[in-house]
Image: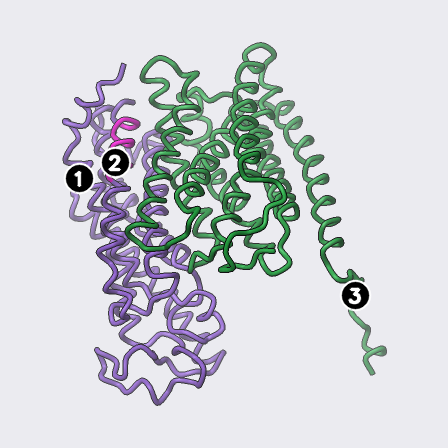
Amino acid sequence: MIDIAGLIAENIMYMLLITLGGVLISVGVHFVPVGGAPAAMAQACGVGTGTVQLAAGAGLTGLVTAGAMMGVTDNMGLVLASGTLGGMIMISVTMLVGQWVYVYGVGCPPASAKVKYDPITKDRQDLYISQGTEGHAIPTVSFVSGVIGAGLGGLGGGLVYYALLKMGEVAAGLTVKDIMSTTGHELVGLASIFAVGIFFMNAVIPSYNIGGTIEGFHDPKFKKWPKAALTSLVVTLLCAVLAVVTLGGM
Amino acid sequence: MSAGGSGEAHAAIPQSQLIAFGIVGGLVGIYAAYFLGNVAGGVFSFMGALGAICATIWGAAAVRRVASYGLGTGVPSIGMLALGMGVVAAMFGLAVGKGIDMEIAGPVIAVVVASIIGLVIGIFANKVLNMNIPVMEQSMTEIAASGTIVIIGLAVAMSGTFLFDIVLTEVITTGYIAVIFIAGGMALLHPFNANLGPDEKQDRTLYTAFEKGSIAMIIAGIVALSAQNASVGLVTILIGIFLWYLGFTGFYARVKRDAFKVVGTGLLPSEEELE
């Protein structure tokens, strides 16, 4: 029989970390300039694909880089920093290559229709908008916003993964570093697929909140983030309870 | 007819029948694979994949129903959400089944837990995120439950059982769970994503789901070649190929039925013909 109350009491700290990680992912997605199908036709600002693909691409890279660091050190700060940077690098590369395609391939200047002046560079935006579009490519403010968002996503993903492994650590009697450096340890697979599941849930929730597209933190839709954060908080907490029983009870 | 954002999709087969088909077919497949596997060896593990196909058809119908209201974002998001919820619930269900010494109850626990997560997300999507889709709560519950059955069904097809320890070593530690995640997610999200538009018909979408489920079954068979043994894998692959053929011809027949005209374009014109 599983002592669920005991497991929860023992791992309450890691459950809170998982929940925090889920909320960070959810908030991070609001920063990422997601253009969706309109952006794929250069008719809206941002990268031309869906939230889930972008957030998952950046966040899962963060998860992998965080995992790689876990095999080397037990230091939580280093693991989380590695996850954050992994996410940031991934989204930067995606946005940079997307930018090349928009500028040199499609032939449009990066401009946002949501603001008159770029909040960071103070460049005039409205003069460069093609008629009938809502902006195109990735202006500076969206790029900076995207890097912040992916950083939060990578941090959140790393946090979830680390906390999941820490829960299993108690049950397995090994440190996270030992678990990660053991080839084929079953805890790694279980914790990573759990982290991926939690990650996808928290990437889709904000995507429904913003209705599919957002330009970054200067977009009026960004103000809706508390709603997604609240939803993610509840859903991730539920998942954290499930995780503690699954991993802690092993 | 059902284009994204046009409201409730017309359904020739009522959703309640598909729910029954998905749950009953899915669980019967999973349990049949388990019990027949205990009696007759692993050859019957293909039954798990048949259960997964039943759940795929149900899940794709639920995706179609909710996504036809217009999600504001692409249909793929809901498939990934389904498998995200499904994988957490499936692992929990199987692990708890082991924890309370009733492994046989694992899949049922998983489906119940998935429904709860789905219901919570559905309620929050309507009440907090203000998506205002009337069928959101019910559809999210259905999608989460079907995603869970797809995961467990394919895991059974790969490893021959749903006992947590064996699934853990054969499916999760080896990383095949990622294959299940994407193949199952595709099977749920792709049918409506590929067919949506003003001429969308329920049976054509569901035939696509059937065909996608069969592809996932073939993949599960390929994994079973190494996870169990060659004969088990071969049986699953052959049945999968047969079902895929049925699914694809059924889908193509409905494409021809729904299209104004199907014409062959021939090969690319040669250089002389262009001049």
Residue B106, given in percent of the width and then of the height, sits at 41, 21
User: Which amino acid does the dot numbered 1 rest on?
Assistant: Leu
Helix, strand or loop at label 3? It is loop
Q: Nearest the camera: A42 or B260?
A: B260
List the residue tagged with mark 2.
A240
Toward the viewer: B190 or A76?
B190
Instruction: Give whichever of discs 2 and 1 has the lower sequence position.
Output: 1
Is A244 magenta? The answer is yes
First to last magenta residue range: A237-247
Q: Mark 3 points at which residue?
A: B265
Sort mark 1 into few (<14), some (14-19) or many (20+) by Cα contacts within 10 Å: some
Give the spatial CA distance, label 2 vs label 3.
55 Å
SS for tag 1?
A: helix
Residue lying furthest bottom in this view? A127
- Please say whether residue A53 is one of the residues in the magenta stretch: no
Chain letter of the green region? B
Q: Position of residue A95 (x, y in %)?
A: 37, 68
Q: Is residue B145 left or right of residue A162?
A: right
Q: Colour of chain A?
A: purple
Residue that numbered label 1 is attached to: A16
Give the residue at x 36% y 18%: B98
Mark 1–mark 3 distance (CA, rounded to whole Å): 60 Å
